[in-house]
Image (cartoon, rainbow, N blue to C red):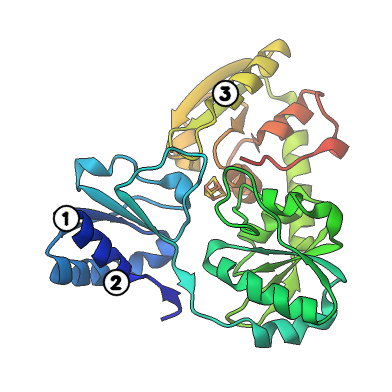
Amino acid sequence: MLFDLQIDTIESWIRGRGFASVALQLPEGLKLRATELSDIIFKDTGAKVVILGYPCYGACDLFTDYRRYAEALVHFGHSPIPNLPQDDNVLYIEARANVEIEKSLKACIDRLPQRLGLLASVQYVHLLPKAKEILEASGRTVSIGKGDGRIFYPGQVLGCNCSSAVAVQDDVDGFLFLGEGDFHPLAAAFGLKKEVSILNPVTGEFRNVDDKRDRILRKRFAAICAAEKAQAYLVIVCGKIGQCRADAADAIEEKLRAAGKTVYRLVTDEITPAALIHYRVDAYVNTACPRIAMDDSVRYDRPMLTIPEAEIVLGLRTWDEYVFDSI
Ligand code: SF4
Protein backbone atom coordinates (compact mmCIF):
# COMPACT_ATOMS: atom_id res chain seq x y z
CA MET A 1 0.00 0.00 0.00
CA LEU A 2 1.52 3.35 -1.03
CA PHE A 3 -0.03 5.40 1.77
CA ASP A 4 0.17 4.13 5.35
CA LEU A 5 -3.27 4.49 6.95
CA GLN A 6 -1.97 3.21 10.30
CA ILE A 7 -4.93 0.96 11.04
CA ASP A 8 -3.19 -0.53 14.11
CA THR A 9 -2.64 2.97 15.54
CA ILE A 10 -6.28 3.91 14.97
CA GLU A 11 -7.56 0.72 16.59
CA SER A 12 -5.27 1.02 19.64
CA TRP A 13 -6.39 4.63 20.07
CA ILE A 14 -10.09 3.68 19.90
CA ARG A 15 -9.61 0.78 22.33
CA GLY A 16 -7.33 2.72 24.68
CA ARG A 17 -9.73 5.64 24.92
CA GLY A 18 -12.81 3.40 25.04
CA PHE A 19 -14.67 5.19 22.24
CA ALA A 20 -17.97 3.56 21.31
CA SER A 21 -18.21 5.49 18.04
CA VAL A 22 -15.84 7.23 15.68
CA ALA A 23 -16.24 9.46 12.63
CA LEU A 24 -13.84 9.19 9.68
CA GLN A 25 -12.94 12.29 7.67
CA LEU A 26 -11.00 11.61 4.48
CA PRO A 27 -9.76 13.84 1.65
CA GLU A 28 -11.20 13.12 -1.79
CA GLY A 29 -8.24 10.95 -2.83
CA LEU A 30 -8.70 8.59 0.13
CA LYS A 31 -12.52 8.38 0.17
CA LEU A 32 -12.24 5.20 -1.94
CA ARG A 33 -10.82 3.50 1.15
CA ALA A 34 -13.63 4.67 3.46
CA THR A 35 -15.87 1.60 3.38
CA GLU A 36 -12.92 -0.75 3.78
CA LEU A 37 -11.67 1.26 6.78
CA SER A 38 -15.15 1.29 8.25
CA ASP A 39 -15.45 -2.52 7.94
CA ILE A 40 -12.05 -3.19 9.50
CA ILE A 41 -12.41 -0.75 12.40
CA PHE A 42 -15.90 -2.00 13.29
CA LYS A 43 -14.84 -5.65 13.07
CA ASP A 44 -11.70 -5.18 15.19
CA THR A 45 -12.92 -2.68 17.81
CA GLY A 46 -16.72 -2.90 17.82
CA ALA A 47 -16.89 0.90 17.58
CA LYS A 48 -19.68 2.29 15.45
CA VAL A 49 -18.17 4.05 12.43
CA VAL A 50 -19.58 7.08 10.62
CA ILE A 51 -18.09 8.18 7.30
CA LEU A 52 -18.20 11.95 6.79
CA GLY A 53 -19.04 12.72 3.19
CA TYR A 54 -18.21 16.43 3.28
CA PRO A 55 -15.43 17.70 1.02
CA CYS A 56 -12.09 17.81 2.79
CA TYR A 57 -9.13 19.70 1.34
CA GLY A 58 -6.87 20.21 4.35
CA ALA A 59 -6.61 20.25 8.12
CA CYS A 60 -8.23 23.68 7.66
CA ASP A 61 -11.39 21.66 6.90
CA LEU A 62 -11.32 19.74 10.19
CA PHE A 63 -14.91 18.67 10.91
CA THR A 64 -15.17 20.19 14.39
CA ASP A 65 -18.86 19.32 14.68
CA TYR A 66 -18.17 15.56 14.76
CA ARG A 67 -19.70 15.14 18.26
CA ARG A 68 -23.14 15.32 16.66
CA TYR A 69 -22.39 11.92 15.14
CA ALA A 70 -19.62 10.20 17.11
CA GLU A 71 -17.43 10.44 20.21
CA ALA A 72 -14.19 10.84 18.30
CA LEU A 73 -12.84 11.83 14.90
CA VAL A 74 -10.08 10.34 12.77
CA HIS A 75 -8.89 12.89 10.22
CA PHE A 76 -6.85 11.43 7.35
CA GLY A 77 -4.32 12.93 5.00
CA HIS A 78 -3.17 16.02 6.90
CA SER A 79 -1.14 16.98 9.95
CA PRO A 80 -2.55 19.20 12.71
CA ILE A 81 -2.34 22.97 12.29
CA PRO A 82 -0.53 23.88 15.54
CA ASN A 83 -1.95 27.38 15.95
CA LEU A 84 -5.56 26.16 15.91
CA PRO A 85 -7.31 24.82 19.03
CA GLN A 86 -6.44 21.14 19.52
CA ASP A 87 -8.92 18.44 20.53
CA ASP A 88 -7.87 15.24 22.36
CA ASN A 89 -10.62 13.26 20.69
CA VAL A 90 -9.22 13.91 17.22
CA LEU A 91 -6.56 11.65 15.75
CA TYR A 92 -4.62 12.75 12.66
CA ILE A 93 -3.49 10.01 10.30
CA GLU A 94 -1.12 11.69 7.87
CA ALA A 95 -1.04 8.88 5.29
CA ARG A 96 2.71 8.88 4.82
CA ALA A 97 3.95 7.43 1.55
CA ASN A 98 5.84 4.13 1.71
CA VAL A 99 8.58 5.02 -0.75
CA GLU A 100 12.33 5.40 -0.78
CA ILE A 101 14.06 8.50 -2.11
CA GLU A 102 17.64 7.51 -2.90
CA LYS A 103 17.29 6.29 -6.50
CA SER A 104 15.08 9.11 -7.79
CA LEU A 105 17.10 11.78 -5.99
CA LYS A 106 20.44 10.52 -7.33
CA ALA A 107 18.95 10.52 -10.85
CA CYS A 108 18.29 14.29 -10.73
CA ILE A 109 21.09 15.40 -8.42
CA ASP A 110 23.19 17.05 -11.17
CA ARG A 111 20.30 19.40 -11.98
CA LEU A 112 20.09 20.81 -8.46
CA PRO A 113 21.74 24.03 -7.25
CA GLN A 114 24.66 24.10 -4.84
CA ARG A 115 22.72 25.68 -1.97
CA LEU A 116 19.39 23.98 -1.74
CA GLY A 117 16.27 24.22 0.43
CA LEU A 118 14.18 21.09 0.88
CA LEU A 119 10.38 21.08 1.08
CA ALA A 120 7.67 18.43 1.15
CA SER A 121 3.99 17.84 1.61
CA VAL A 122 3.12 15.91 4.76
CA GLN A 123 2.94 12.58 2.89
CA TYR A 124 6.65 12.87 2.07
CA VAL A 125 8.04 14.99 4.91
CA HIS A 126 9.66 11.93 6.55
CA LEU A 127 11.92 11.61 3.48
CA LEU A 128 13.58 14.99 4.10
CA PRO A 129 16.34 13.86 6.55
CA LYS A 130 17.45 11.09 4.18
CA ALA A 131 17.32 13.43 1.18
CA LYS A 132 19.44 15.95 3.10
CA GLU A 133 22.02 13.29 3.92
CA ILE A 134 22.28 12.21 0.26
CA LEU A 135 22.56 15.78 -1.00
CA GLU A 136 25.15 16.76 1.60
CA ALA A 137 27.22 13.70 0.64
CA SER A 138 27.23 15.14 -2.90
CA GLY A 139 28.78 18.36 -1.55
CA ARG A 140 25.67 20.50 -1.45
CA THR A 141 24.61 22.78 1.36
CA VAL A 142 21.09 21.85 2.38
CA SER A 143 18.59 23.80 4.50
CA ILE A 144 15.28 22.64 5.92
CA GLY A 145 13.39 25.59 7.37
CA LYS A 146 11.07 25.71 10.33
CA GLY A 147 7.67 27.14 9.42
CA ASP A 148 5.36 29.38 11.42
CA GLY A 149 2.49 28.40 13.72
CA ARG A 150 0.46 26.90 10.88
CA ILE A 151 3.15 24.35 10.00
CA PHE A 152 3.73 21.13 11.95
CA TYR A 153 6.99 19.78 10.48
CA PRO A 154 10.24 21.46 9.37
CA GLY A 155 10.24 21.71 5.58
CA GLN A 156 6.50 21.12 5.31
CA VAL A 157 4.50 23.34 2.97
CA LEU A 158 0.75 23.83 2.67
CA GLY A 159 -0.94 25.25 -0.37
CA CYS A 160 -1.49 28.46 1.61
CA ASN A 161 1.73 28.60 3.60
CA CYS A 162 5.37 28.39 2.54
CA SER A 163 6.85 29.85 5.74
CA SER A 164 9.32 26.95 6.06
CA ALA A 165 10.76 28.04 2.69
CA VAL A 166 10.72 31.73 3.62
CA ALA A 167 12.73 30.87 6.76
CA VAL A 168 15.75 29.74 4.71
CA GLN A 169 15.33 31.69 1.48
CA ASP A 170 18.46 33.78 2.04
CA ASP A 171 20.60 30.65 2.49
CA VAL A 172 19.64 28.86 -0.72
CA ASP A 173 19.77 29.25 -4.50
CA GLY A 174 16.63 27.20 -5.08
CA PHE A 175 14.22 24.69 -3.58
CA LEU A 176 13.48 21.05 -4.18
CA PHE A 177 9.98 19.88 -3.26
CA LEU A 178 9.35 16.18 -2.61
CA GLY A 179 5.79 15.21 -3.40
CA GLU A 180 3.13 14.92 -6.06
CA GLY A 181 1.41 17.58 -8.14
CA ASP A 182 1.89 21.33 -8.38
CA PHE A 183 -0.42 22.52 -5.62
CA HIS A 184 2.04 22.66 -2.69
CA PRO A 185 5.23 23.67 -4.54
CA LEU A 186 3.33 26.48 -6.27
CA ALA A 187 2.78 28.05 -2.84
CA ALA A 188 6.57 28.33 -2.51
CA ALA A 189 6.91 29.49 -6.12
CA PHE A 190 4.28 32.23 -5.56
CA GLY A 191 5.75 33.26 -2.24
CA LEU A 192 9.46 33.44 -3.15
CA LYS A 193 11.66 34.68 -5.94
CA LYS A 194 13.59 31.39 -6.18
CA GLU A 195 13.45 28.47 -8.55
CA VAL A 196 11.28 25.63 -7.22
CA SER A 197 11.71 22.12 -8.63
CA ILE A 198 9.59 19.07 -7.92
CA LEU A 199 10.72 15.51 -7.49
CA ASN A 200 7.91 12.97 -7.38
CA PRO A 201 9.43 10.22 -5.20
CA VAL A 202 6.93 7.64 -6.54
CA THR A 203 7.42 8.11 -10.29
CA GLY A 204 10.87 9.75 -10.24
CA GLU A 205 9.52 12.64 -12.38
CA PHE A 206 11.59 15.83 -12.00
CA ARG A 207 10.52 19.27 -13.29
CA ASN A 208 10.13 22.85 -12.22
CA VAL A 209 6.99 24.90 -11.74
CA ASP A 210 8.19 28.25 -13.09
CA ASP A 211 6.08 28.13 -16.27
CA LYS A 212 2.93 27.22 -14.42
CA ARG A 213 3.57 29.92 -11.79
CA ASP A 214 4.08 32.55 -14.52
CA ARG A 215 0.90 31.46 -16.33
CA ILE A 216 -1.13 31.79 -13.13
CA LEU A 217 0.42 35.16 -12.26
CA ARG A 218 -0.50 36.48 -15.72
CA LYS A 219 -4.10 35.47 -15.02
CA ARG A 220 -3.92 37.23 -11.66
CA PHE A 221 -2.78 40.38 -13.43
CA ALA A 222 -5.81 40.08 -15.75
CA ALA A 223 -8.15 39.63 -12.76
CA ILE A 224 -6.70 42.72 -11.07
CA CYS A 225 -7.16 44.77 -14.25
CA ALA A 226 -10.72 43.44 -14.67
CA ALA A 227 -11.59 44.52 -11.11
CA GLU A 228 -10.43 48.09 -11.60
CA LYS A 229 -13.91 49.32 -12.59
CA ALA A 230 -15.70 47.30 -9.89
CA GLN A 231 -17.89 49.32 -7.55
CA ALA A 232 -19.63 46.65 -5.45
CA TYR A 233 -17.55 43.99 -3.72
CA LEU A 234 -18.50 40.78 -1.95
CA VAL A 235 -15.97 40.01 0.78
CA ILE A 236 -16.09 36.26 1.40
CA VAL A 237 -15.36 34.80 4.84
CA CYS A 238 -15.21 31.04 5.25
CA GLY A 239 -16.60 29.44 8.41
CA LYS A 240 -14.14 26.52 8.38
CA ILE A 241 -11.86 26.51 11.41
CA GLY A 242 -8.60 26.85 9.45
CA GLN A 243 -9.78 29.26 6.79
CA CYS A 244 -11.71 31.82 8.80
CA ARG A 245 -9.99 35.23 8.65
CA ALA A 246 -12.64 37.60 9.96
CA ASP A 247 -10.04 40.16 11.11
CA ALA A 248 -8.42 40.26 7.68
CA ALA A 249 -11.90 40.64 6.18
CA ASP A 250 -12.57 43.60 8.51
CA ALA A 251 -9.32 45.25 7.41
CA ILE A 252 -9.89 44.89 3.66
CA GLU A 253 -13.54 45.97 4.00
CA GLU A 254 -12.38 49.16 5.69
CA LYS A 255 -9.92 49.83 2.84
CA LEU A 256 -12.59 49.18 0.21
CA ARG A 257 -15.04 51.53 1.94
CA ALA A 258 -12.39 54.20 2.33
CA ALA A 259 -11.96 54.02 -1.45
CA GLY A 260 -15.69 54.66 -1.91
CA LYS A 261 -16.64 51.07 -2.76
CA THR A 262 -19.85 49.35 -1.73
CA VAL A 263 -19.07 46.28 0.36
CA TYR A 264 -21.08 43.24 1.37
CA ARG A 265 -19.84 40.41 3.55
CA LEU A 266 -20.74 36.81 2.81
CA VAL A 267 -20.05 34.02 5.31
CA THR A 268 -20.11 30.58 3.76
CA ASP A 269 -18.30 27.25 3.78
CA GLU A 270 -19.11 26.69 0.16
CA ILE A 271 -17.19 28.83 -2.31
CA THR A 272 -18.20 27.72 -5.78
CA PRO A 273 -19.43 29.58 -8.88
CA ALA A 274 -22.99 28.32 -8.25
CA ALA A 275 -22.92 29.49 -4.60
CA LEU A 276 -21.83 33.03 -5.56
CA ILE A 277 -23.86 33.66 -8.67
CA HIS A 278 -26.87 35.12 -6.81
CA TYR A 279 -25.11 38.16 -5.40
CA ARG A 280 -25.29 41.45 -7.32
CA VAL A 281 -21.71 42.60 -7.06
CA ASP A 282 -18.93 43.37 -9.52
CA ALA A 283 -16.05 41.49 -7.86
CA TYR A 284 -15.19 39.16 -4.99
CA VAL A 285 -12.45 39.39 -2.37
CA ASN A 286 -11.88 35.91 -1.02
CA THR A 287 -10.38 35.81 2.48
CA ALA A 288 -10.70 31.98 2.68
CA CYS A 289 -8.27 29.57 1.00
CA PRO A 290 -6.21 31.85 -1.30
CA ARG A 291 -5.85 29.08 -3.86
CA ILE A 292 -9.54 29.31 -4.77
CA ALA A 293 -8.86 32.73 -6.30
CA MET A 294 -5.42 31.90 -7.65
CA ASP A 295 -5.93 28.48 -9.22
CA ASP A 296 -9.66 28.43 -9.98
CA SER A 297 -10.52 32.03 -10.90
CA VAL A 298 -11.47 31.15 -14.49
CA ARG A 299 -14.47 29.26 -13.13
CA TYR A 300 -16.02 32.48 -11.78
CA ASP A 301 -17.96 34.98 -13.86
CA ARG A 302 -16.59 37.98 -11.96
CA PRO A 303 -13.04 38.78 -10.84
CA MET A 304 -12.08 37.01 -7.62
CA LEU A 305 -9.19 38.59 -5.75
CA THR A 306 -6.99 37.68 -2.82
CA ILE A 307 -6.49 40.34 -0.13
CA PRO A 308 -3.14 41.68 -1.47
CA GLU A 309 -4.62 41.70 -4.99
CA ALA A 310 -7.53 43.85 -3.77
CA GLU A 311 -4.94 46.22 -2.30
CA ILE A 312 -3.33 46.51 -5.75
CA VAL A 313 -6.72 47.37 -7.28
CA LEU A 314 -7.15 50.08 -4.64
CA GLY A 315 -3.69 51.52 -5.38
CA LEU A 316 -2.44 50.60 -1.90
CA ARG A 317 0.38 48.47 -3.30
CA THR A 318 1.99 48.18 -6.72
CA TRP A 319 2.12 45.11 -8.95
CA ASP A 320 5.85 44.90 -8.11
CA GLU A 321 4.79 44.54 -4.47
CA TYR A 322 2.56 41.57 -5.30
CA VAL A 323 2.70 39.02 -2.48
CA PHE A 324 1.23 35.60 -2.01
CA ASP A 325 -1.78 35.68 0.31
CA SER A 326 -0.38 33.34 2.93
CA ILE A 327 -2.53 32.12 5.82
S1 SF4 B 1 -6.51 26.94 3.21
FE1 SF4 B 1 -6.37 25.97 1.18
S2 SF4 B 1 -4.22 25.65 0.82
FE2 SF4 B 1 -4.47 26.05 3.01
S3 SF4 B 1 -4.59 24.04 3.95
FE3 SF4 B 1 -6.67 24.73 3.50
S4 SF4 B 1 -7.17 23.89 1.46
FE4 SF4 B 1 -4.93 23.78 1.75
Can residue 216 be seen from the camera position used here?
A: no
- Can you tell me whether the CB of the residue at mark 3 lies under 8 Å from the nearest atom of ligand 1? no
Left or right, 79 with respect to 52, comes to right
Q: Are marks 2 and 1 in contact (CB under 8 Å)?
A: no
Left-right relation of 44 to 156:
left
Examine the rendered structure and indicate whether residue 232 appears above or below residue 239. Answer: above
At label 3, the amino acid type is: Asp
* Screen quadrant of the C terminus: top right
How many angstroms separate mark 3 from mark 1 (CA)?
39 Å
Q: Is mark 2 within 8 Å of ligand 1?
A: no
From the viewer's side, name the closer residue of 290 and 7: 7
- Label 2 Cα neighbours within 10 Å, binned few <14 / some 14-19 / many ≥20: few
Where residue 28 sits, quadrant-wise, is bottom left
Q: Nearer the viewer, mark 3 or mark 1?
A: 1
Residue 325 % position (x, y): 68, 39
| Residue that carries the numbered disc 2 in the rendered image | 8
Q: What amino acid is labelled 2 in the image?
A: Asp
Q: Give how far apart the Cα atoms at labels 3 and 2 are.
A: 41 Å
Q: Give the residue type that dot 1 points to.
A: Gly
Residue at 66%, 35% (x, y): give it. Answer: 305
**Residue 18's disc number:** 1
Density class for disc 3 (Cα within 10 Å; few <14, some 14-19, many ≥20) is few
Q: Position of residue 38 (x, y in %)?
A: 22, 66
How many marks are shown on the rendered structure? 3
Q: Residue at x 35, y 45 (%)?
A: 63
Find numbered disc 2 in the image and state the secondary structure of the residue it sits on.
helix
Above or below 167: residue 305 = above
Tell me residue 153's x, y (percent). Answer: 58, 57
Q: Could you tell which of marks 3 and 1 lies nearer the N-terminus? A: 1
Q: Which residue is denoted by mark 3 in the rendering?
A: 247
Q: Nearer the viewer, mark 3 or mark 2?
A: 2
